[in-house]
Amino acid sequence: MVETLAVSVRAIVILAVLLIAALAWWVWMDKPGPSSNGERIASLVDYAPETIRAIEMVYRSRVTRLERDESGAWRVSLPNPREADPRKVEGLLRALSEVAVVSVVNDHPGGDLDAFGLETSAGSLLVFTESDTPARRIELGGRSPVGDEVYVRDENGAVLLVEGSIVELLGRVPGSFVERRFVPVEADGVGAITVRGPASGFRLERRDATWWLTEPLEDLVDATAGERLIRAVRELRAIELLDSEEIDLARGSFATPVRLTVETGSGEAPGTVEIGAPAGRGKWFARRSGSTEFWGIVDEEQVRELAREVDDLRDRRLAPFSRPDVREVRIETGDGVLTLARSEGRSWTAKQGDGASSLTGEGVEAFLDRLRWLRAAGFGVSGGRPGERILEVVLSGEAGELGRLTVQRLRGARGSDEGALLVARSSWRPGFVFTVAAEDLDAVPRSVDDLEDLSEEASREDEAA
């Protein structure tokens, strides 16, 4: 009797499990899934980006609206009006155009929307083109039971199965589209930069592909320093944005600001950025005036990058020439004159006194490379005066002299500068006096033997590389 009862209980349990499994299979199979091949049928948002004038996204009761103003610039209009970062908006439009429709589940209104999670939509997308009536309306439903795709309903009531990336796009927070750059221009769009502080300032201008200082003096800008400054200007961004109450409190901090003005290549200035007083540890108040004003807080490191000393921006190269242009080199020292003339290809002829010899060229080229990258230790001579001339290097090309570098001793310098620093003048940099470290001129050859040593050193460097 007990055994019979145990068998009956087991049979009932087995039948119940089978019944539940069959029911689950029936429900699963009854719920539509993606097309069998999962191929892309169409784009969910199939509009050219330039034709879209507004987008409104709702996700879990959070509304984000982006729209173009009369000038065509993008703005965040909801939930809080702000200037929009066009790069972020363009990225959104591009991503929306890439969301694929993989299956048309139901191409006519009606039916059981609850089966697709559309009875109470979790989100929606409105796309506006020419009129105030949305050209595209998408309601977000549930996920497919057999993949990452998501059910949506369009403005015609059709139920579609689309790629799941639409959920992440609709879920982006409004702040992710807000413009935080104080100077929203691309690097190649910058034509001039002016920085004015309470006590000093400078101005840079782009001339063709070269940057020049024009104030407080006119001189070449060091390429690395110039790129670093441009990057600092373009990356000056608000780590925090100020609301109206915070703006009222911050107004008094701009009594003696640092002013930054950036002009485009056409001479237009999008606005002036002012950096005021510290806003706390490592932070400074900043604001941008102009047609699109906004206030924020910037990092102290960004401020330091802008408040540069003029000499830090100047090109320190003493002889910025092109090596292939050189046909003759004349080196005059206290030991005499060494003349190097290019013959054919990489071959050179060296003359010193009454003697002449042929060179393979590696040593001459190594010297020219070091000369064109020779950098000044400083600008001007303070605490000393130029003494006797100890070196002059003259370079000539096919059309005549390319330039010359003249080096003198530094007399009357204080302390260790006596003998360690020399005075240099360069025809490539007319009107300026430089100081140069004496040890940096050790590579200037005084004889053919020096050139052969340079050639061997260059060969070892090539082998090591």
Image: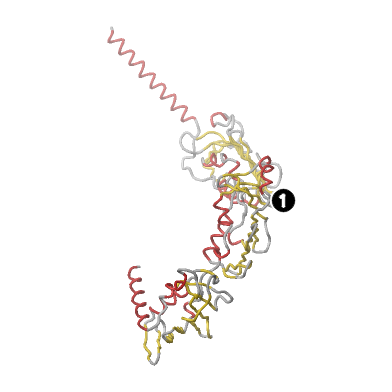
Q: Would you call the spot at circle 1 few (<14 residues within 10 Å), some (14-19), or many (20 or more)? A: few
User: At 54% across and 72% down in the image, what residue appears?
Assistant: 381
User: Which residue position holds label 1?
Assistant: 70
Rendered position, 311 above or below 113 = below
Q: Which residue is outermost to the top?
A: 1
Give percent across and percent down for residue 17: 38, 21
Relative horizontal placement of residue 323, taking residue 6 as reference (left or right): right
Q: Quadrant of the N terminus?
A: top left
Give the residue displayed 34% in from the left and 13% down from the top. Answer: 9
Q: Nearer the viewer, residue 24 or 364?
A: 364
Q: Position of residue 395 (x, y in %)?
A: 49, 82
Pick the quarter of the image with the C terminus.
bottom left
Q: Is residue 340 left or right of residue 158?
A: left
Q: Is residue 308 above or below residue 116?
A: below
Task: Single out the residue that lies furthest toward the bottom.
Answer: 354
Compared with 322, 191 (above or below) is above
Q: Is residue 357 visible?
A: yes
Q: Residue at x 51, y 64 (%)?
A: 224
Q: Position of residue 300 (x, y in %)?
A: 56, 50
Residue 183's quadrant in the figure?
Answer: bottom right
| Residue 172 screen position, x and y as percent | 57, 41
Q: Is any atom of residue 191 visible in this view? A: no
Q: Nearer the viewer, residue 415 or 65?
A: 415
Q: Disc 1 residue type?
A: Glu
Secondary element at image label 1: loop
